[in-house]
Amino acid sequence: MSTPALKIYNTLTRRKEEFRPIDPANVRMYVCGPTVYDYAHIGNARPLIVFDVLFRLLRHLAKQGVWDGGKGETKVTYVRNITDVDDKINARAAERGISIRELTEETNKVFQEDVRALGCLEPTMQPRATEHIAQMIKIIERLIASGHAYAADGHVLFDVPSMPNYGRLSRRSLDEMIAGARVDVAPYKRGDMDFVLWKPSKAEEPGWDSPWGRGRPGWHIECSAMSWAHLGETFDIHGGGIDLVFPHHENEIAQSCCAFGRDVMANYWMHNGFLQVEGEKMSKSLGNFVTIHELLHTEKFGGRKWPGEVLRLAMLRTHYRQPIDWTVKALEEAEQALSSWYGRIFELGLDTDDQFAAPVSAVNALSDDLNTAQLLAELHSLGKRGSYPELLGTLQLIGFTGKGSAINTIFGTMRASEAPDTMSAALGVETDFKQVINNRVSARNAARASKNWAESDRIRDELAAMGITLKDNKDGTTSWEVKR
C-alpha cells in the first residue's frame, strides 16, 4: 500500500492542503519556542508535543521517499528558538536580584529537562535570540531602505500602512487588530498600529550597538531573524499556539516579506488550540496555574506526580486544533491506557529497543492533519485485537520509545513504595511482571479481608486495565491470567 500524502490545515488559507515542500531535499519547519524567564506552563507543552509529533511524522515520510521520488534521502530541519532577551526577563531578573544571564541559563536548563521528560526530540537547531542581533539589525536596515520602517527618537518602527495586505493571516478588522495589539501611544509613532523593531536600552538593561544607538530588539523581529538565518527567506512550515497568530505571527510575516520582497514567509502556518484546566481558563488568580515541572515533580495537580509519557498521551487525545481541557481524569485515563499497553508489551517480551512498524492506518491518521484523536482510537483497536507489535510501532512513531522512558508508566497507577524492587526492574523481565501482579493481588485480598470493597474494586479495575483477569472464590483471588 502506498504512503499517504500529508495534509495539514493552513491558517493562512483557512483550509486543509496537501503538503509539498519548497525543496524536496530539505523540509524546513520553524516553531516559536520559550521566553526563558519562568518555567513553562502546561499550555506551553501543547505546541512542544504537537510539533514534535509532526517532526517525527515528517522524518518518517521522508524516509519513505514521499518527496524525493522514493530515494528516502530528504532531510527535515526543525528550528525552535529560545528567546533570551525580553522585558519580562529583565523584570524577573531584577525581582530575584540575579543577573539576566543567570536567570536565562537556569530557566532554559529546566525547560530542556522538562521537554525531554515529555518525550520530545531535540530540534535540529535551538538558536538563541542574543546570538542573532546582527541578523536583526540587517533586516531592520533593509526595511528602512525599502520604506517599510522608520527611525524615531532612538526607536525603529515598522510602518504598517506601507504593507497593503497586512492582516492577511489573522483576518481581523482594524479595530480588532488595535485591541489585540494593545497599542502603545507614543509621540514618535506615525500610526497607531506601527510596532517596535528596535528600542533604546537604559544603562542597567541589556543592549547592543546599532546604527540607531545602543538598544535591544523588539519581540517580533527576533523570530524573523532566526528563521532567516537557519531556514532562509521562505520556508515550509511555521508553527505555534493560536494565541500567537496576532500580533506575533502577523508581524513576523510583515517584517520578513517586506525585507526580502517575498509574497510569503512560510507556505503553511499551523496553530494549536487553547488549553484550559478543569473547565476554566488557567490563571494564577484562580490557583489553577500549573507548570510542566510541577506536574512532573510535585503533587500539586491531582495530589501526585505524573510521568512525562502520561502527560504526552493526555495531550494527544485531543486534535491539536481543538481546545483541550486539562483534567486529572484525563491523566488517569491516559495512564491507565499506557499501563495496559506497556504491561502487555513487556509480558509478551517485545523489546522496545527494536523498531516496530506502525500500520498504514496509523500513518494515515497522522497524515490527515495530525489526527491524533483518530490515532488513539487505532491504538485501542490494536490492543483489543492483540496486535501488540503494531501497537508498539505506533507508540514509537509518536514518541513513546526506549526502555528507560517506560519505567514510570508500565505500572503507573502503583506506588513505588508498594513494590520498590520490582518497580526499578520492571523493564520486561517476566518474573518481575508476575511479582508485581502478585503484589497487587495480595493487596486486593487484604482489602477484601478488611471489607474495604472500594479498594478491592479499584485494584481489580486497575489490573483489568493492564489486561489481567482474576479468578476469585469466596476466600479471595486464587489465580490470574493475562488476556490473550
Image: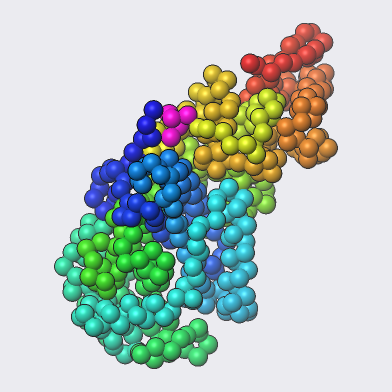
> Which residue occupies 33% across, 55% down?
23
Q: Quadrant of residue 293?
A: bottom right
Q: Position of residue 40 (x, y in %)?
A: 54, 59
Which residue, as the protein is rendered here, is positioned at the far left? 164
Q: Nearer the viewer, residue 356 or 247?
A: 356
> Which residue occupies 62% across, 57% down?
113
> Which residue occupies 51% across, 29% down?
379
Residue 234: in sight, yes or no?
yes
Q: Quadrant of residue 252?
A: bottom left
Horizontally, residue 463 falls left or right of residue 66, namely right
Q: Nearer the viewer, residue 58 or 448?
A: 58
Which residue, as the protein is rendered here, is positioned at the far top? 473
> Which residue occupies 36% across, 57% down?
238
Q: Nearer the viewer, residue 9 or 125?
A: 125
* Magenta-drawn segment: 359-363
Image quarter (top left, top right, bottom left or bottom right) of the N terminus: top left
Eyeballing the image, is 69 above or below 197? Answer: above
Residue 302: in sight, yes or no?
no
Horizontally, residue 76 falls left or right of residue 391, namely left
Total numbered labels: 0
Residue 131 highlighted magenta (yes or no): no
Image quarter (top left, top right, bottom left or bottom right) of the C terminus: top right
Horizontally, residue 409 falls left or right of residue 86, namely right
Q: Quadrant of residue 163?
A: bottom left
Eyeballing the image, is 345 above or below 70? Answer: above
Q: Position of residue 65 (x, y in %)?
A: 40, 42
Q: How is this picture coloured?
A: rainbow
Q: Could you tell me what secondary structure mostly forms the magenta stretch?
A: helix
Eyeballing the image, is 40 above or below 279? Answer: below
Q: Nearer the viewer, residue 18 or 85?
A: 18
Horizontally, residue 433 falls left or right of residue 277, namely right
Eyeballing the image, is 106 above or below 438? Answer: below
